Image (cartoon, coloured by chain):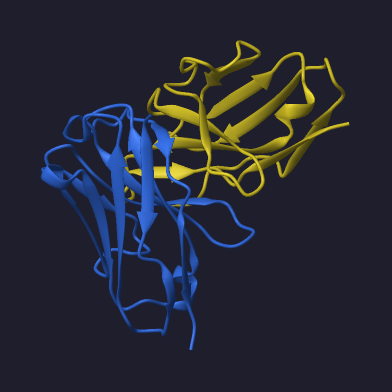
Amino acid sequence: QSALTQPASVSGSPGQSITISCTGTSSDVGGYNYVSWYQQHPGKAPKLMIYEVSNRPSGVPDRFSGSKSGNTASLTISGLQAEDEADYYCSSYTSSSTPYVFGTGTKVTVL
Amino acid sequence: EVQLVESGGGLVQPGRSLRLSCAASGFTFDDYAMHWVRQAPGKGLEWVSGISWNSGSIGYADSVKGRFTISRDNAKNSLYLQMNSLRAEDTALYYCAKTTGFGAPNDAFDIWGQGTMVTVSS
């Protein structure tokens, strides 16, 4: 099972919106609405930001939103803030012998 | 406070074994599936293994299948990972993660420990 494909880096200015893509196949992202997104600051554990494609856990700002079209899921951060600078990973359930797969990760830089 | 604390990491020679533990507190442990996720230095996240609430469903990444064994003791609120035949490529920070459910495909990893470092080197 190969990792889901994410852009290595995305950047934006404070207040802008950015979108991170997560591309898989019909065996993972495209086949299930079981995509989640995680934020990881340097030296810290990952934090769940979005689950089941578009649901936000309690406490996650509504600036974070998720969507999916075909084999590609997306995480959008609206009104970008300095504290959003971190690495972001998508994850999906898969029908392969390895039931969960993460994305390659995207470094978000706030200019 | 919901908390996961991993232990058992360290430096080990290739081919040897190591057992990781994860102590859970602040939630009803036996209501949730649990997983291990690892991160090699400077690299991304890699799912390693998961176990349902009652140990009835267990899964492994192809990279560790046949070498690693996940288990849990609900009476002790603890999760374990027995790692045998360790390789250099197993070097990573190993996270214990709680899921949002009992072990269904839609589970997400909502609580993470701080990780325990495993270094495989001669």
Q: Is residue A100 above or below residue B85?
A: above
Looking at the image, residue A16 sits to the left or right of residue B70; the answer is right
From this viewpoint, is residue B55 visible?
A: no
Q: Measured from the top left, where is residue B13 in percent x and y? A: 41, 85
Number of numbered markers: 0
> Which residue lies most toward the top here?
A62
What percent of the width, then of the height, locates residue A33? 40, 22
Which is more toward the observer, B1 or B8? B1
> Farthest residue toward the front?
B1
Q: Which chain is blue?
A: B
Q: Is residue B4 left or right of residue A103?
A: left
Figure check: B26 above or below A46: above
Res B20 quadrant in image: bottom left
Q: Quadrant of the N terminus of chain B?
A: top left
Q: Where is residue B60, by image quadrant? A: bottom left
Residue shown at 76% from the left, 14% from the top? A79
Which residue is drawn at the image coordinates 38% and 31% (left, top)? B108
Q: Position of residue A36 (x, y in %)?
A: 47, 29
State the residue at coordinates (42%, 21%): A52
For residue A107, side relative to residue A22 (left or right): right
Residue B85 in view: yes
Q: Is residue A59 above or below residue A88?
A: above
Q: In the rendered view, does B94 fall on the left or right side of A104?
A: left
Q: For chain A, give the colour.
A: yellow
Q: Residue at x 29, y 37 (%)?
A: B25
Picture layout, residue B51 above or below residue B14: above
In percent of width and height, residue B118 lies at 45, 68
